Image (cartoon, helix red, strand yellow):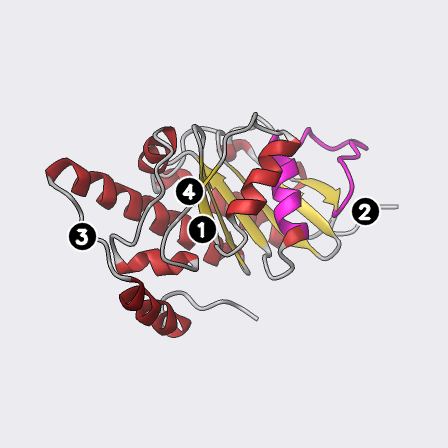
Amino acid sequence: MKPPYHDCTELRQAVIDACLEMNAAGINQGTSGNISVRAENHMLITPSGVPYEKLAPEDLVLIPLGGSPEQQGQLKPSTEWPFHMAILQAKPGVNAVVHAHPVYCSALAMNRQTIPACHYMVAAFGGSDVPVADYALFGSRHLSENIIRALQERSACLMANHGAVATGDSLPRALWRMVELETLAKGYTASLTIGKPHILSEDEMAEVIAAFTDYGLKDSR
C-alpha cells in the first residue's frame, strides 16, 4: 500500500519550486537549506544532499508526524528533519518551515545578535525583535528544543552560529518571511557600520504589530 500523500505531486512540486526560488533569491546556497510542509498527519521534507535542480516530486521524504523516517525506498531526509518535525508538532497553525543560511542572517547569528526593533518590519515576525536560538549541534534534540523556545512567540528566528528559520501557515508565507528576514538583517547590519540605529519604542512597535493584521502576504485559511 502506498503511504499517504505518495501521489501528491502538486504539493511535492511546490516544495521543489520554493527551494529553487530560495536559491535564485540568494537567501540560500547549494543544498544547505531545507523546506518542509505539513501533509495532514505527515511531514514532507527535502532529502539530504540532493541539488534542488535535480529534485523530482517523488524524492521528497514523507515522515509521520511524531514519528521517525521510515526509509521504505525513500531517500534520506535532511539532517535537520528533527527541528522541522518539532516545529510542526509544537505549532499547529504552522504548515510550512523554511530553513536557510542567508549571509546576513548568518553573520548576525555568528555574533549571536538579536535583531531589535530597528525597523517596523520586525513586526512581521510576531514581536518587537527577532531572537536568536541558542547553539546546539545540527540535527540534535537540543537544537530542536532551542528553536522551539525561540519561536514561542515568534514566526522566525536566527540560529546561533548557523542560519535562520521561518515559518508560516502556508509555504508562500514562510518563504516570504525568510526573504523579509534576510532583507531586514542586511539593513540592520549596514546600519551598524555607519552609526547606531535608532530603536523603535515599545509603544511604537505595539502600534505596528496591531497594524500588521492586514499587512503583506495574507495567510491562507
Q: CA distance from mark 2 to mark 4?
A: 28 Å
Q: Secondary structure at mark 2?
A: loop
Magenta range is: 65-89
CA neighbours of label 1 inside 10 A, class few (<14), some (14 to 19), many (20+): many
Nearest to N terminus: mark 2 or mark 4: 2
Q: Label 1 amino acid?
A: Leu
Q: Closest to the observer: 123 or 174?
A: 123
Q: Which residue is mark 4?
A: 22
Q: CA distance from mark 1 to mark 4?
A: 8 Å
Q: Which residue is mark 1?
A: 175
Q: Secondary structure at mark 4?
A: helix
Q: CA distance from mark 3 to mark 4?
A: 30 Å
Which residue does the image show at 64% across and 51% down from the upper left?
Answer: 88
| Contact between labelled residues 3 and 1, with CB atoms less than 8 Å apart | no
* Residue 71 included in the magenta stretch of the image: yes
Q: Of discs 3 and 4, which sits in the foreground?
A: 3
- For the stretch drawn in magenta, the main secondary structure is loop
Question: Where in the figure is residue 76, as x and y percent of width and height?
Answer: 68, 28
Q: Which residue is mark 2?
A: 3
